Amino acid sequence: MVSLFALFFSLSLTLSKNAKNALAPKTKTKTKKQKLNRALREDSEMVHVPVSIDTFYPEVAEAAVAAGADIVNDVSGGLDLYATAAAGESGKSGNGADAAAADAADVADAGGGGASPGESGMLETVARLGVPYVLMHMRGRPATMQSAALTAYDDDGGGGVVAGGAPPPPLPVVAGVGRELLARARAALAAGVLPWNLILDPGLGFAKKPADSAALLGDLDVLRAQGLPGVFGRLPMLVGPSRKGFLAELMREGGGADGGGSGAGAAARPPPPPEARDDATAAACVACVARGAEMVRVHNVPVVGAALRVADALLRRGRAQQARQEGAGGLAPGPAVGRGAALRG
């Protein structure tokens, strides 16, 4: 079951990495017409498999669904990224620091609510279309999302002395992403998106330092339990760690692919290129599943799929053994693996 989810969402990434919506910090934002033409051409070639359209343009999403796409994947969380990205492009010849400062002010004005304010109309569009919608956490625009201001996650004051038996407060990045993702999820439901069509993505690598992306991945279960209350904590979670920069940093810290060890020498080595990060991606995806993620999004389906099939089998076996020891009649959810191991059966 895990590998089917990996395959399903890898198709979306295969399309998006062909420039449909690459959002690396230095990537230029394509026009709506370019995106629409590319989406329709590529989606028409995928008519026999489920397809996720990767876009933050409502017009592209609507046309792609009309052409047969099954899911809308939106890195902006329904915010008007097109307008802010265009503003960033027009201001590039001026002062780039001004754009980053403006985005930081937007986050502050929104009370830590995420990216620059202003709805794009995507939430209403997907609600009307009635298709599953992947809502991702992000701050700012592609050109500024990795700025110091937008990658800062301050403690909201929820720390302090932990009462006996109470869980410790989440890390600042987990608390911040939880608050902001929750706000956008609530906006989606308010716009008419059905709860069973909503999938949440914490946005690894988007407006997050490498260490924060790693910490967020390791605390996905905390994000769900403490950052997403009620029905929001029961929504499916999609995570996309595939080949991302924070994995390269972890590989380098731990010795990397060449086993050269850590320390000053490791820091001086260049990070491994994206195509050399598939084994690290497989490890990250296993961690995602163990921490409760239902879906992963990957480049190399055979490598990650094999790892997830083994992980799924072992986690299921562990849960079955625990149930037998507890004398339960069925599979009791284990405290560590939670929902993600069995992927709802």
Image (cartoon, grey):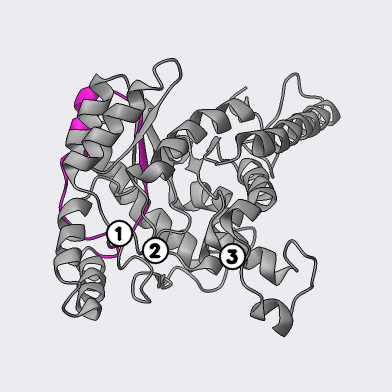
Q: Earlier in the sequence, mark 2 or mark 3?
A: 3
Q: Residue at x 53, y 56 (%)?
A: 244
Q: Secondary structure at mark 3?
A: loop
Q: Specify the amino acid type for callout 3.
A: Ala
User: Pointer 2: what residue?
Assistant: 207
User: Pointer 1: what residue?
Assistant: 114
Q: Which mark is residue 163?
A: 3
Q: Residue at x 46, y 19 (%)?
A: 49
The percent coordinates of residue 266 (x first, y second) are 71, 77
Q: Is residue 150 above or below residue 117?
A: below
- Asked if the stretch drawn in magenta spans residue 144, the answer is no
* Mark 2 Cα-neighbour bin, 10 Å: few <14, some 14–19, many ≥20: many
Nearer to us: label 1 or label 3: 1
Q: Quadrant of residue 333?
A: top right
The percent coordinates of residue 113 (x first, y second) are 28, 59
**Mark 2 to mark 1 CA distance (whole Å):** 9 Å
Left or right side of 95 for 305: right
Q: Residue at x 36, y 54 (%)?
A: 23
Q: Earlier in the sequence, mark 2 or mark 1?
A: 1
Stretch in magenta: 111-140
